[in-house]
Image (cartoon, rainbow, N blue to C red):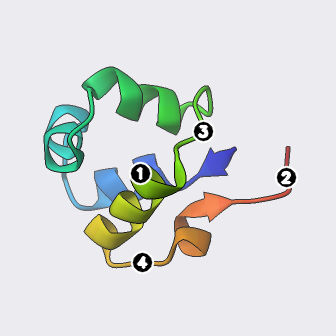
Amino acid sequence: MKNRIEEMRSSRGIRQDELAAELGVSRQTISSLENGRYNPSIMLAHRIAEYFGMTIEEIFIFGEE
């Protein structure tokens, strides 16, 4: 699934390891999410959206696979 995580993270000057620590996941999970190799659980998607102050739909791009 495509997403805007890397774009949102980079625009705020946040490193992958910093975001991972805030979300309670590994840096590898963030890398896999950004590269579209891993689809998050609904709980993780919610935490990511909440962290960036956005909706899940604003971050994750559905139906373009």
Q: Residue furthest top?
A: 28
Kindly identify which residue carries mark 4: 54
Q: Which one is earlier in the sequence, the residue at label 3 or at label 4?
A: 3
Tell which tag, 3 or 4, sits nearer the viewer. Answer: 3
Residue positioned 61% across, 26% down in the render: 37
Q: Residue at x 39, y 28 (%)?
A: 29
Give the CA distance from mark 2 to mark 3: 14 Å
Please, is residue 49 above or below residue 63 in the view? below
The local crowd at label 2, few if under 14, some if 14 to 19, many if 20 or more residues have their Cα within 10 Å, is: few
The CA span between labels 4 and 2 is 20 Å
Secondary-structure class at tag 4: loop
30 vs 45, left or right, is left
The percent coordinates of residue 26 (x first, y second) are 26, 26
Q: Looking at the image, is mark 2 or mark 1 nearer the viewer?
A: 1
Precedes in sequence: disc 2 or disc 1: 1
Residue 64, which numbered label?
A: 2
- CA gap between label 1 and label 4 equals 13 Å
- Give the residue at x 53% y 56%: 42
Disc 1 marks a residue whose amino acid type is: Leu
Q: In the rendered structure, which disc, 2 or 3, sits on the residue that comes first in sequence? A: 3
Depth-wise, is mark 1 or mark 4 nearer the camera? 1
Q: Which residue is mark 3?
A: 39
Task: Specify few, some or many for label 4: CA neighbours under 10 Å numbering under 14, 14-19, or 20 or more.
Answer: few
Mark 4 is on which residue type?
Answer: Met
Kind of residue at badge 3: Asn
Judged left or right of residue 18, residue 55 is right
For residue 45, side relative to residue 35 (left or right): left
Based on the displayed image, in which of its 4 quarters is residue 11 positioned? bottom left
At which x and y percent is residue 60?
Answer: 60, 59
Q: Are marks 3 and 4 in contact (CB under 8 Å)?
A: no
Q: Nearer the viewer, residue 20 or 9?
A: 20
